[in-house]
């Protein structure tokens, strides 16, 4: 299968699929702008920057020296306004859920909210030289992945698909930005069903 950026012409005219991008703590504004511009090239969405900054500190767990991603999602929920379609929070803090050592992100399956961290997507985390382009690429892949979960997509068995599971940054690097044909068909069905409501 050849992965390519999909042609979502059928959904291009829709102004309802707006992803609101929210900062959790101080984040790199260049990365945020990159996501705002690039996410619509990979999914049939548009992106707006929400002019709020959510404080990550209430989600901090000192015993792990990490931030509980589910707690951040819980705090995002009240920020969803009537008419909002999806809200993705982007942060630089290290995220975890209790059953895993860390996560790159978490989403409400079929719900409106997701959070993505670039803490462990940075080359510097692994003792390597900074690579801003690689970081931007990894962050975009994670945003596509978590947004897919909000559309009801589960992890895909095709390691190249944006919905493939990744428990290490090397697996993120193997993914494409695009969805495989099966995940794309499910996304189109989800968007078509949502548009008819």
Image: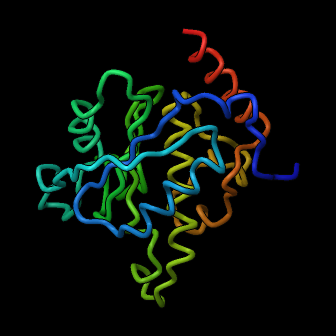
The residue that appears at 12% across and 61% down in the rendered structure is 62
Tell me the quarter of the picture where residue 111 sits.
top left
Which x, y percent locates residue 135?
A: 50, 72
The residue positioned 36% from the left and 67% from the top of the image is 29
Q: Is residue 8 left or right of residue 164?
A: right
Give me the residue at 58% from left, 66% from top. 137
Q: Residue furthest right?
A: 1
Coordinates of residue 109 in the picture (x, y in percent): 46, 30
Position of residue 113 measured from the top left corner of the image (x, y, whole percent):
37, 36
Q: Tell which of 114 and 14 is nearer to you.
A: 14
Instruction: Give above or below for 98 relative to 174.
Output: above
Vertical arrangement, residue 140 with respect to residue 132, above or below: above
Is 63 displayed left or right of 122 in the figure?
left
The structure residue drawn at horizontal position 54% and vertical position 42%, both measured from the top left corner, is 46
| Horizontal side of residue 96 vs 31, given as left or right | left
Q: Quadrant of residue 179?
A: top right
Q: Quadrant of residue 114?
A: top left
Which residue is the extreme one toward the bottom? Answer: 129
Residue 116 or residue 125, whichever sits in front:
116
């Amino acid at each position: 299968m050849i992965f390519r950026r999909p042609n979502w012409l059928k959904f291009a005219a829709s102004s309802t699929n707006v992803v609101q991008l929210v900062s959790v703590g101080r984040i790199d504004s260049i990365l945020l702008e990159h996501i705002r511009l690039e996410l619509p090239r990979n999914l049939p969405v548009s992106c707006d920057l929400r002019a709020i900054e959510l404080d990550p500190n209430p989600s901090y767990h000192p015993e792990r020296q990490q931030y509980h991603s589910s707690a951040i999602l819980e705090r995002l929920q009240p920020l969803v306004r009537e008419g909002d379609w999806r809200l993705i929070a982007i942060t630089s803090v290290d995220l975890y859920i209790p059953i895993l050592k860390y996560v790159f992100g978490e989403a409400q399956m079929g719900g409106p909210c997701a959070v993505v961290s670039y803490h462990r997507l940075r080359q510097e985390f692994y003792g390597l030289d900074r690579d801003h382009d690689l970081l931007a690429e990894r962050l975009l892949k994670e945003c596509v992945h978590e947004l897919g979960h909000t559309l009801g997509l589960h992890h895909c068995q095709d390691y190249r698909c944006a919905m493939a599971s990744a428990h290490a940054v090397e697996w993120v690097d193997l993914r494409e930005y695009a969805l495989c044909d099966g995940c794309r068909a499910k996304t189109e069905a989800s968007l078509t069903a949502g548009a008819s409501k």
